[in-house]
Amino acid sequence: MKSSKGLVQVIIAVMLLVGLMPLGNTLNNIKKDAGLADRFIQRPVLGFDNIAADVLWIKTIQYMASIKKADVKSSNIIYQMFERVTDLDPLFTAAYTFGGLAIAHKAPAKSLTLFDKAIAHNPNIGWRIPMFAGVVSMHNMKNYDKSAKYFAFASEVKDSPMFLKRMQALAKARAGDLGTALILWESLYNSSDSASVQIAKRELVRVAAEVLKTSTDNKLRNKADRVIKRIL
Amino acid sequence: MSIILTIAQSVYQKVIKSKILYVIVVFCLFAIAYSTLYSAVTAGEETKLMKDIGLAGIAVAAMLISIMVGSTAIPMEIESRTIQTLISKPVKKHEFILGQFLGAVYVSLLSIAIMAVGFVIILAIKTHMLNLVMFKPLILICFEAIVLVAVSVLFSTFCSSMVSSILAIVVYIAGHLSYQIPFLVERAGNVVTKFVGLLLYYALPNFQYFNVKAPVAHGIYVPWGLIFGVILYGAIYTAIMLLVSLAIFKNKDFA
């Protein structure tokens, strides 16, 4: 009698365990939908990823403070440290910003790697980090196509400032894509932002003149001609 | 029911005299308060650091308290032979187990509540606002502690307090790493490995479900559906542990 009661309890326990399986899958789906899913590549810190990232963050700040003169070697070390911090805590946007900007001058490619990681892991990253990425691409790497993409991404974020569209247009012009630059500057000239209108007026004339001087595309030349006549 | 509550109260009164409980709680509160001094070295991230230290500290303290209380309640009764007196009276074995479990849970939850209130107050003083959203991870820490107490009670029905504490810690560690098993099982070569892997995955408690500290510290919304789902998971898993404990304890003879 005793053993049969015990057996019944075990059977009920096994049935409950089987019932946990669909519940576990449902919880995984809810986590995935809310953007909270666990990652396979994760340090085994038993759910204390954040605190491990914080300890490493403090250590990294201390290391940066100890550097007398920034060079490529120290920038690479700083990059590796911030890589580890952001591996542990991919939502730590301050680490991406701090790290990316700290190494932008001596290791711009690695700086962009950090910014790309921030954008990949944080759907609501805002406009600041893509803007920083655009600036690093433009000034440190002279990669104007890439910087235009970053500025375009940043300008599409809700409540982003107007100057990002101006930066995108500027980057397109420097990349040699004068047609797109003309379109972007024209849209800014037609906007309600007075600062953008003033700058757009000046840049439209400059880009249109560049088109008329260098371009062999008749369609583009006609457009540039219309723009100049409209503004002047 | 009154017998179960009486046994629970007796467990509470025994455990509350333990100095180590107070040391753990006080140390946790001290660590949370001390984290307010880190502002000089965190480059503007002191609030995040405070939240992380607070939640991690409470989680660790809750784990230690639950395992300590859950693993020692029953073996203490067995070693002191008071269990013979209890079981010989009209106290059924299932009432004994449930009473021990409830007493241990009460001590764990009381300790967590004290640490949680201290944490929220210290955070409110630092940030000048009441961060009620911190209660989401704290609720799940409470249920994680309940599951750990149940696991510890299960082991204590057939092991000494030392062995059951170690086994409970092993289950805690394995429970936090078990979410990786499905990834590994997918890549497994043979059917036996896959079967054993999946059996382990579902048999171990998946403590990663209870871990929402990171998104809450970053201000990311955690849906209430997830919280209630995890609470349900914890309740069912606790029931499973208690049923197996009862099945094992029923066959034990204390004469």
Image (cartoon, coloured by chain):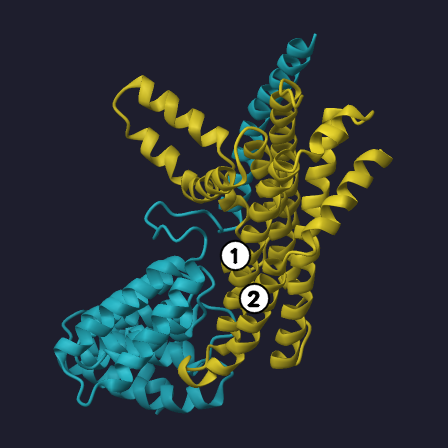
Chain colours: A cyan, B yellow
Asked if residue B103 lies left or right of residue B67, the reply is: right
Q: Which circle's residue, 1 or 2, is located before the other in the chain?
A: 2
Asked if residue A192 lies left or right of residue B7, the reply is: left
Q: Dividing the image into 4 quarters, which one contains the N terminus of chain B?
A: top right
Q: Amino acid at mark 1?
A: Val
Which x, y percent locates residue B196? 38, 23
Along the viewing direction, whichever of B15 and B88 lies nearer the viewer: B88
Which residue extends farthest right? B2
Q: Amino acid at mark 2?
A: Cys
Q: Which mark is residue B28?
A: 2
Task: Name the residue located 44 percent from the left edge and 64 percent from the top edge.
Answer: A51
Mark 1, residue position? B60
Q: Quadrant of residue B88?
A: top right
Which x, y percent locates residue B198? 42, 26
Asked if residue B97 lies left or right of residue A14, the reply is: right
Q: Determine whether label 1 and label 2 are within 8 Å by CB.
A: yes
Along the viewing direction, whichever of B126 and A190 lies nearer the viewer: B126
